[in-house]
Image (tube, grey):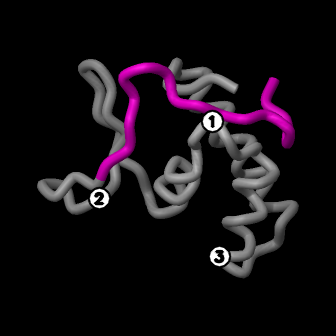
Amino acid sequence: MITRESVPVFRRGIRQKFDTARNTHVLLGPERVIVLDEIAAAITALVDAQHSVAEIAATLAERFAADAQEVEADVVEFVTSLVEKGLASA
């Protein structure tokens, strides 16, 4: 279960990059390309095995001038989906 204290990290071979052909951020993995929206790209840019979900959420809440609790709930949900898809661990 992902909590605010969880520290997400991408699995080996998974990385984020800007895809100039699609003009958007993507997650790349073995035989996978996942197109990211602006919020997903902002979250994945902070997944570095050093920052907790709470720290990622606080950074994004400040950057987007958004409610910290709502952002944290969204980050927990998104990181949970990454873990369920086998793209990250926490």
Tell me the distance, in whole angstroms, between the alpha carbons under discs 2 and 1: 23 Å
Q: Where is residue 81 in the image (x, y as percent from the top left)?
A: 61, 32
* Disc sitting over residue 63 in the figure: 3
- Quick check: 13 above or below 65? above
Inspect the image, locate mark 1, and give the three-letter code of the amino acid beneath it: Ala
User: Residue 28 occupies which quadrant of the picture?
Assistant: top left
- Considering every residue shown, the one lying at the far left of the view is 21
Residue 39: within the magenta? no
Which mark's residue is nearer the viewer, 2 or 3? Answer: 3
Inspect the image, locate mark 2, and give the three-letter code of the amino acid beneath it: Thr
* Disc sitting over residue 67 in the figure: none
> Does residue 18 appear to the left or right of 3 in the view shown?
left
Q: Where is residue 49 in the image (x, y as percent from the top left)?
A: 63, 35
Q: Circle 2 sits in a helix, a strand or a loop, which is it?
A: strand
Span colored in magenta: 1-17
Q: Badge 3: how crowded within 10 Å, few (<14), some, or many (20+)?
A: few
User: Residue 58 occupies which quadrant of the picture?
Assistant: bottom right
Q: Is the C terminus in the top left, top right, bottom left or bottom right quadrant?
A: top right
Magenta stretch prevailing secondary structure: loop
Tell me the distance, in whole angstroms, between the alpha carbons under discs 2 and 3: 20 Å
Question: Mark 2 = which residue?
Answer: 24
Residue 14: within the magenta? yes
- Quick check: 33 above or below 56? above
Q: Badge 2: how crowded within 10 Å, few (<14), some, or many (20+)?
A: some
| Front-lying residue, 54 or 76 | 54
Question: Mark 1 = which residue?
Answer: 49
- Considering every residue shown, the one lying at the far front of the view is 50
- Quick check: 32 above or below 22? above
Inspect the image, locate mark 3, and give the three-letter code of the amino acid beneath it: Arg
Tell me the distance, in whole angstroms, between the alpha carbons under discs 1 and 3: 20 Å
Q: Which residue is drawn at 65% across and 76% down?
A: 63
